[in-house]
Amino acid sequence: MRLVTRSAFLALIAGVALAHIAATHGALAHGPTPQKVDQSITIAAKPDAVWAVVGDFAGIGTWHPAVARSEGQGGNASDGRRRVTLKAGGTLDEGLDEWDAAKRTYSYRLSDADLKALPVSSYSATLTVTPDGDGSKVEWIGRFYRGDTGNEPPEDLSDAAGKAAMNRYFGDGLKGLKALVEGKVTP
Amino acid sequence: MICKATRIALGLWLAAWLGSVPVTAGTVYVASQQAGTLTRVAPGAAGISVGPAPAQAAVGPDGLIYLTHPDRRSVTVVDGRTDAVLRHLAFAGQPFGLAVTPDGASLLVGDWSGDRVVRISALTGAVEGSAAVGRDPAGLVIDRRGRLYVADRESRQISIVDTATMVRIATVPVGVAPFALALSPAEDRLYVANVRSGDLSVIDTQALRTIATVPVGAMPYGVAVSQDGTRILVTNQQAGTMTVLDAAGPQVIANVAVGRYPEGVAIDGGTAYVANWFSDSVSAIDLTRLVETARIPVGEGPRSLVVRTSGGDRS
């Protein structure tokens, strides 16, 4: 009986604490339910020509139409970094995990969330260039967590909002890359 | 002259005969977050609909399978023998990591954003006790004595909780962002996959301290130990590989390519299974040859694997 009473009391305390935590738990925390972002595009150019543009980690400012500028640090080594400032505001501070020119691929992740840049709390991503007929295919995929990882995220920090923003950012980037490499438009 | 197949068969037989731990076969299940299913890992197996976004799974000694739904505040109970969904237990919090007490009567549930572990009745979901742990409790594993280990992801530590009293008895610092846990069969070692530091911490469970830290691949998200305790497997989410370590050392002996964003890993007999979250598949890896032998399509977003045996569970 004593245990039951104590448990009930603890549950009450925990409930009050939980309500408090739900309201204050950092929106920037890594969450429990990841979401996918999956974009790809074909480009009428050889993989080496595409890699020459997209392979430089800090060079995203030359091909991504949403990027105002990108500053690199450490080159394309496995601890290389880039600080990407978006035209619409906000910055993405990202670090390389792996960079493999032979396989024309690199993997990286976000260091600290900036909800103004993208409404997500964390992500990791991989960009890969492969041969596709006479041209190339570029895949840009990732795993991210919504902007508010709590149980009742506001609409602009939900899974749906994160999915829309991440797919738009990756998709627009690939379109910009294609346009630049194929020589049709300068972003 | 003995042909290669015969030699391999003889070798396997000898290894099985010499091994002190019998190699048992069970049924392997995978929980798929995006599909909302629990599926037997077998070609063409239909998924059991368990409700939206299951994250982690655990098996009880009676063959019941439990799944957490962090976004739905619930825990689903599935009868592994009949594949029937028995019930959904309400949970006041964001349930993620999960472990079943040795007697099967209670569940230990990590409350991700509540920074606590709650003991609930496996039958009714009634709260039996609670213990505060570090920030964002991720993986949970319980030993045969009922001692619970919790990976406190944002606190860079393991919390150790006595589940009979629900008192945290110790914390052990590990690497950055510990996520997945596995105990050795003798329960004298706890292996911790640290996502952000890309390494594996080895904890002496008697001394309660880290005795080794071994670099693995980028973003390790899953860990399992072979039934004889000689091999440790770690899935590296960002590298798309499974690292095989010799537990003596421990030292890396192989990296096996698997699908994209591998997460959960489980061992059944001489085969390892890896949930490829992005590829919507499960890789089967032969642990003798250390090669991927099959890739089985499953429901979208597979994350957590469990093995149901007649004698108990492993994950």
Image: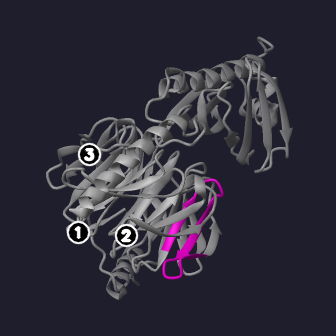
Of B168 and A127, the residue lying toward us: B168
Residue A86: percent from the left, percent from the top? 75, 23
Q: Which residue carries the number 3 mark?
A: B76
Residue B223 at least partly seen: no
Answer yes or no: are tags 3 and 2 on the same subunit: yes
State which quadrant residue B193 falls in.
bottom right
Q: Which residue carries the number 2 mark?
A: B270
Q: Between disc 3 and disc 2, whose residue precedes?
A: 3
Residue B263: percent from the left, percent from the top? 48, 51
Give the number of the mark in front: 1 or 2.
1
Chain at numbered mark 1: B
Q: Looking at the image, is A139 positioned above or below residue A103? A: above
Q: Between disc 1 and disc 2, whose residue precedes?
A: 1
Q: Which residue carries the number 1 mark?
A: B103
State which quadrant residue A94 falls in.
top right
Chain at numbered mark 2: B
Give the number of the mark in front: 3 or 2.
3
B5 left or right, relative to A62 = left
Answer yes or no: are tags 1 and 2 on the same subunit: yes
**Label 1, label 3: how many angstroms apart (C-alpha)?**
19 Å
**Label 3, label 2: how many angstroms apart (C-alpha)?**
30 Å
Does the CB distance between marks 1 and 3 fall below 8 Å? no
Residue B237: percent from the left, percent from the top? 55, 50
Residue B292 at least partly seen: yes
Q: Where are the magenta residues, as a range? A: B190-210
